[in-house]
Image: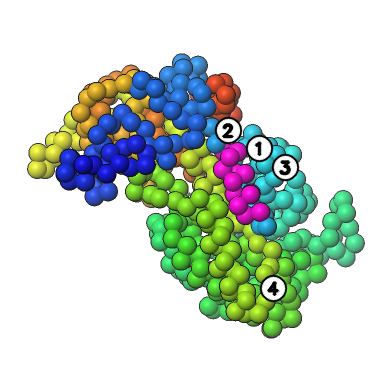
Amino acid sequence: MPTAHPSGWAHADGALRANRPGGPHWLREPRDPDALVPSLWPRTATKDDGVLSVGGVPLPELVREHGSPAYVLDEADFRARASAFRDAFASYDVYYAGKAFLCTTVVRWLAEEGLSLDVCSGGELAVAERAGFPMERVGFHGNNKTVAELERAVGLGVGRVIVDSFHEIERLAELTRPLVEEGSRGPARGPVGVMVRVTAGVEAHTHEYIATAHEDQKFGFSIASGDALEAVRRVHAAPGLELLGLHSHIGSQIFDTSGFEVAARRVLALHATVREAIGVEMPEIDLGGGFGIAYTTQDDPSEPAQLASEVTSIVEHECRALGITVPRLSIEPGRAIVGPAMCTVYEVGTVKEVALDGGVVRTYVSVDGGMSDNIRTALYDADYSATIASRPSGAEPALSRVVGKHCEAGDIVVKDEFLPGDVRPGDLVAVPGTGAYCRSMASNYNHALRPPVIGVRDGKTYTVLRRETEADLFATDVGVS
Ligand SMILES: Cc1ncc(COP(=O)(O)O)c(C=O)c1O
Ligand SMILES: N[C@@H](CCCC[NH3+])C(=O)O
């Protein structure tokens, strides 16, 4: 008997269907390649008679109205995930990491749901400003903020700047000194709140490009070298800066809390050292984001409540051991809130069968988007899943690869998936888990027009970000007369 997966998929365990050669070790051939794996999709996703609906909207209808490809954003799912983090981490400040996906609509939802916001560029800060987000709930990140960006952040009154280099501390100290000396910094503001981003020396279990706590990378001040303590001293000594605490972010798409544990231990040890060496009890600590989500059946993420209890017990245990009071804690989830709340719908243009070694056949399904709307597969070798969204199929599963339309062999959206063997031009294919780092990292490669983000809720659609037009492409081409 196959083992029943909670998703409703029957995972072949050898008795029924062996794993087919040509696919990765974790990919199991489903009994029904048309079935949804609910854990990968926005919560309101359903499939009836082969037609995928999100937020009560059948995707073929959405495509008729808004075109293809399109990112589909489930508002209820986004809000539910945001409020789940807020409630599970009730004694923390939860900063949504805007780099995952940001637009004024989402910023308004965050304000309504009571979350704070992490931005990492002048552009992201501008979105927060445009949406009227309370600036005291904004944290400003970046390893190379410009003076203009720092001036803007200070002028707007952001709640905290997370400093990342000695040059930045010098610039920020310089920038804020006259304001303090004059005793005013605009509407009733004291010194600027500062957190010091530290590198805990942790090798996080994730792709090398998205791990950020090992020593040999660009972010943060090393704890081991003593730079982090020196940075704390300099911030403390600057009259225009208010030392809030230490910040640590170990990387992204992490499932194993052992990395957080080691980082928390090292950060808290430094926190205790600061008390002894400088005589300052810093009020806060930020443990960053990075909580993983399910892109395929191989991923098994924890719920926010589970994460909260694990992280909190690690911190409380360490504080007890060090004899310090638990500082005010904050976290910065991005992917875990917006990632599963979106999917991308594409239209199939061509289908090609390619014979591999050993008699294996791979079906290449070309869609009307690709690496310009999802660069993660090419950049991080990321795995995704897919399903046919527009019709039922009784066809046998075929080992398939969903590829884009760009002039690049690495233009792959979904490396390995079983799709029904009769996929044909005109079918809609949907890819779950595309809310984080897809639209926000999208490009105009090959002069592709970036797809719209279409909100769905209670059977209705609305445009969150419109589709780009050729006029948008030519807007920056000053040679156009
Ligand atoms: C400083 C910081 N905070 C938060 C995040 C959000 O990470 P994630 O989207 O994986 O939760 C990132 C991105 O990795 C980051 O660099
Ligand atoms: N962009 C990365 C995450 C790193 C983001 C910020 N530090 C991803 O798609 O997984």
Q: Position of residue 217 (x, y in %)?
A: 47, 65
First-in-chain label (2 vs 1): 2
The image's mark for residue 133 is: 3
Give how far apart the Cα atoms at labels 4 and 2 are. 38 Å
First-in-chain label (3 vs 2): 2
Q: Nearer the viewer, residue 148 or 65?
A: 65
Q: Residue at x 39, y 56 (%)?
A: 207
Give the label, 3 or 2, closer to the camera: 2
Q: Residue at x 74, y 81 (%)?
A: 279
Q: Residue at x 9, y 43 (%)?
A: 358
Q: Position of residue 445 (x, y in %)?
A: 42, 36
First-in-chain label (4 vs 2): 2
Secondary structure mostly seen in magenta is helix
Q: Which residues are drawn in magenta?
A: 78-90
Amino acid at circle 4: Thr
Tell me whether the residue at label 1 lies in contact with that at label 4, contact meaning CB atoms closer than 8 angstroms.
no
The image's mark for residue 109 is: 1
First-in-chain label (1 vs 4): 1
Residue pushed farthest bottom? 277
Tell me whether the residue at label 3 lies in contact with that at label 4, contact meaning CB atoms closer than 8 angstroms.
no
Residue pushed farthest right? 183
Give how far apart the Cα atoms at labels 3 and 4 are. 31 Å
Tell me whether the residue at label 2 lies in contact with that at label 1, contact meaning CB atoms closer than 8 angstroms.
yes
How packed mark 4 is, by other alpha carbons closer than 10 Å (few <14, some 14-19, many 20 or more), is few
Give the label, 1 or 4, closer to the camera: 4
Q: Is residue 135 inside the magenta stretch?
A: no
Tell me whether the residue at label 4 lies in contact with that at label 2, contact meaning CB atoms closer than 8 angstroms.
no
The image's mark for residue 75 is: 2
How packed mark 3 is, by other alpha carbons closer than 10 Å (few <14, some 14-19, many 20 or more), is many
Relative to 94, is 437 above or below? above
